[in-house]
């Protein structure tokens, strides 16, 4: 039985659908958040080759959770790559760990579609559900953005700077008057 997703005439393939296929045993990826999430959802262990941005941190997190391994793409060689693949495919701990997470992730009373329908109907039934609205909805622009707090902090900083300037001037005057007295003697 072959995978029915591959067609040389297509520019794009549905990664989520491919990962859902039961014959997929390993997902080799660049550790993008979307791909990792899809693999976790479908319970597929991963071998990540992070490139830049958040990918190295995503790959490290995936390894710490026990969902797979990571290899540095910049120093990639055939032997470590092969060993990484063989380790993940031969050691059931990776697929078991990510499969357990997948089951937890999917354990919900409603599907995503049912959840959207429920909450949409709930808001309609309760005329906008004002009891669920954030308190920010009922605050002034100044309070919602903490502008009053920032103004108080700015005033405190200005007063402290002015006090510091006055103290420094006072100290300089005292020191310069003492040095003038010493020179006169």
Image: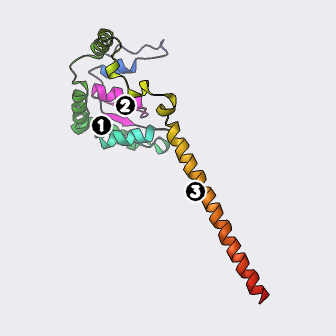
Q: Nearer the viewer, residue 130 or 69?
A: 130
- Label of residue 36 in the image: 2
Q: Secondary structure at mark 1?
A: loop
- Is residue 150 found left or right of 85 in the rendered image? right
Range of residues picked out in magenta: 23-48
Q: Residue at x 74, y 86 (%)?
A: 182
Determine crowd level at label 1: few under 14, some 14-19, many 20+ residues with C-alpha closer than 10 A.
many
- Ranked by sequence position, the earlier of labels 1 and 2 is 2
- Is residue 42 found left or right of 72 in the rendered image? left
Indicate the position of residue 46 as horizontal and vertical percent values.
Answer: 34, 34
Determine crowd level at label 2: few under 14, some 14-19, many 20+ residues with C-alpha closer than 10 A.
many
In this view, the residue farthest toward the right is 184
Q: Nearer the viewer, residue 185 or 28?
A: 185
Quadrant location of the C terminus?
bottom right
Indicate the position of residue 108 as horizontal and vertical percent values.
Answer: 22, 22
Q: CA distance from mark 3 to mark 1?
A: 54 Å
Determine crowd level at label 3: few under 14, some 14-19, many 20+ residues with C-alpha closer than 10 A.
few
The residue identified by callout 3 is: 160
The residue identified by callout 1 is: 67
Indicate the position of residue 111 as horizontal and vertical percent values.
Answer: 26, 16
- Label of residue 87 in the image: none
Q: Nearer the viewer, residue 66 or 170?
A: 170
Q: Residue at x 53, y 45 (%)?
A: 152
| Up-down relation of residue 6 to residue 156 (above or below) | above
Q: CA distance from mark 2 to mark 3?
A: 50 Å
């Amino acid at each position: 039985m072959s995978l029915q997703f591959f067609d040389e005439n297509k520019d794009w393939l549905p990664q989520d659908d491919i990962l859902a296929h039961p014959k997929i045993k390993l997902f080799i990826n660049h550790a993008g958040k979307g791909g990792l999430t899809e693999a976790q959802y479908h319970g597929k262990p991963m071998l990540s080759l992070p490139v830049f941005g958040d990918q190295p941190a995503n790959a490290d997190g995936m390894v710490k959770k026990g969902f797979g391994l990571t290899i540095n793409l910049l120093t990639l060689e055939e032997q470590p790559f092969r060993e990484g693949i063989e380790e993940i495919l031969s050691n059931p701990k990776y697929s078991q760990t990510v499969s357990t997470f997948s089951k937890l992730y999917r354990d919900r009373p409603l599907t995503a579609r049912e959840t959207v329908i429920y909450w949409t109907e709930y808001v309609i039934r309760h005329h906008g559900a004002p009891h669920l609205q954030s308190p920010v909805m009922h605050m002034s622009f100044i309070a919602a953005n903490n502008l009053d707090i920032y103004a108080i902090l700015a005033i405190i900083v200005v007063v402290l700077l002015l006090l510091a300037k006055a103290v420094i001037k006072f100290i300089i005057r005292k020191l310069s008057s003492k040095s003038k007295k010493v020179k006169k003697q």
